Image: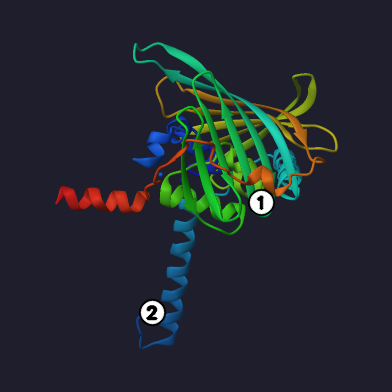
Amino acid sequence: MLRGQSQRPGRVIWLLRTMMILWRMKDWTRNPAPVGCRFGFILAAGALSGLLAQLAFAADPKPDVDPRADEMLKRMGECLGQAKFFSVNAEIWQDIQLSSGQHIQAGRNLELHVRRPNRLHIEVHSPHRNRELLYDGKAITLFNRVQNLYGTVPTSGSLDEAMDLACERFGITMPLEDFLRSDPHKDFLEKVISGADVGPVSVMGVPCEHLAFTQTNIEWQVWIESGARAVPRKFVITYTDEPDSPQFTAIFSDWDFTTALPDFVFQFEPPAGASRIKVKEMRAANQSRKMEAK
């Protein structure tokens, strides 16, 4: 989970810390040898196999996850991953530090629309920013409404495949990405060390089950609605490897699994006067910098 992509409550989690940068349009443009004795060969192979098994265990120990927490997270994953389409709003709060050194919480609102297997529309609103991201099955488009600028990344395939390509080649990370994937349960548990079911609690008056997980350098919590519809209602990431352990918080509302999402929801039409700019590929940019360093 928080792929960071090596550390995540999926890809969401590690890269959420860079989400504000990625949503600035300027940044989008700038993430067996032979042996004589058969018996000896068998012993050697057995020893090698045992050593590899020990190394594998040391490198990737089995996570200590409460079965109740795992089951609840699985229910949430099935609810989101198996839905043909859904819409949701999310209120985001993130700890940041001003140039003066003062710590504050910055807020923004997200509107997400997902239609599987290959449609996504995200709008981000804050007092200073108005951004939009769309995937129509053929390309990902990033739009800055304030500056009236947009860039396009050609791609195809499933939503998972498009998000992977956008991140690996262009450094574009989708907000709350782990919740959008086809198997959120698998994604979230990818790098988990431990997990617990804290118990029942209410979020904005909605009965939920509170789950808490740890990974290397981060801790994350999710509050999942109790009852038949196991949707997330709150999500918190704590970056324990950073000074003062800053947090990222998302509060979900208005889950909708019934309103159809037609094609036009995911299609981008440049408004009058909009300028198209190039979205640079990270690998090409990195290679260019290496050549300059030589």
Residue 176 position by quadrant: top right
Q: Is residue 271 left or right of residue 266?
A: left
Q: At 41% across and 44% down in the image, what residue appears?
A: 31
Where is 274 relative to 278, above or below? above
Residue 174 position, x and y percent, is 54, 41
Q: Secondary structure at mark 2?
A: loop
Q: At 29% across and 49% down in the image, what residue appears?
A: 286
Residue 232 position by quadrant: top right
Q: Nearer the viewer, residue 43 or 141?
A: 141
Q: Nearer the viewer, residue 268 or 171?
A: 268
Residue 15 position, x and y percent, is 48, 38
Q: Nearer the viewer, residue 204 or 278?
A: 278
Where is 283 relative to 35, above or below? above
Residue 148 image label: none
Q: Nearer the viewer, residue 108 or 96?
A: 108
Is residue 9 visible from the viewing direction of this image? no
Q: CA distance from mark 1 to mark 2?
A: 40 Å
Q: Secondary structure at mark 1?
A: loop
Residue 32 image label: 2
- Location of the N terminus by quadrant is top right
| Residue type of the residue flagged with mark 1 | Ser
Residue 214 position, x and y percent, is 55, 35
For mark 1, what is the residue?
182
| Residue type of the residue flagged with mark 2 | Pro
Residue 107 position, x and y percent, is 55, 20
